[in-house]
Image (cartoon, rainbow, N blue to C red):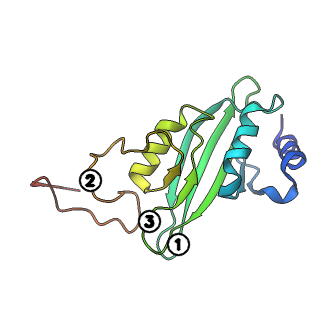
Amino acid sequence: MTFSEITQVLTEQFGIDSFSVVNQKANQPIVQIQASQLFELCQFLANDERLFFDYLACITGIDNGPAANTMEVIYHLTSIPYEHNLAIKVIAERPADGTPPKVPSVSSIWRTADWHERETYDLVGIFFENHPDLRRILLPNDWHGHPLRKDYQAQEFYHGIKVIY
């Protein structure tokens, strides 16, 4: 199935205004959607027999920095039997009060999202609503901050041990 055919199916299901094409010429074309649509759209992508995106290969979290005041989450999807790919991009605002940006969890759709969302939470600090066990996966539970944020302040010591970067 071509990218045009995929977007046609999405348009029929969700409407022309439900997504925007970010890049259709990449090996993995990208569409951007609102975070509020994420769960429903991903559920459709996974379950529709024409699309059958059965593999969530990766979730990428990007901090655009305090000046931009946004973060991005990109979902890299593949349909193994149909051999087509798609990336879904969601932009989340960074709340002014310092609480983490929130995006719905897709871990009930693809089991691999469990680890990918935990990694994104751990390193970038994006909170995945309704995740069954959202806790750090790479850093200790008492680590301060999220190291891939642009405004991350590295701690000098961790339990009395000098932290060297």
Kindly report the distance in space between the C-alpha atoms of the residues bearing marks 2 and 1: 23 Å
The residue type indicated by label 2 comes to Trp
- Residue lying farthest to the top in this orientation: 81
- Going 52% across and 50% down the picture, which residue do you hit? 128
Mark 2 highlights which residue?
143
The tag earlier along the polypeptide, 2 or 3, is 3
- Going 40% across and 57% down the picture, which residue do you hit? 148
Name the element at disc 3: loop
Is residue 140 something that shows in the picture?
A: yes
The residue type indicated by label 3 comes to Thr
Image coordinates of residue 137 in percent, x first then y, are: 36, 41
The tag earlier along the polypeptide, 3 or 1, is 1
Mark 3 highlights which residue?
99
Residue in the foreground of this view, choosing between 84 and 15: 15
Mark 1 highlights which residue?
69
Q: How many marks?
A: 3
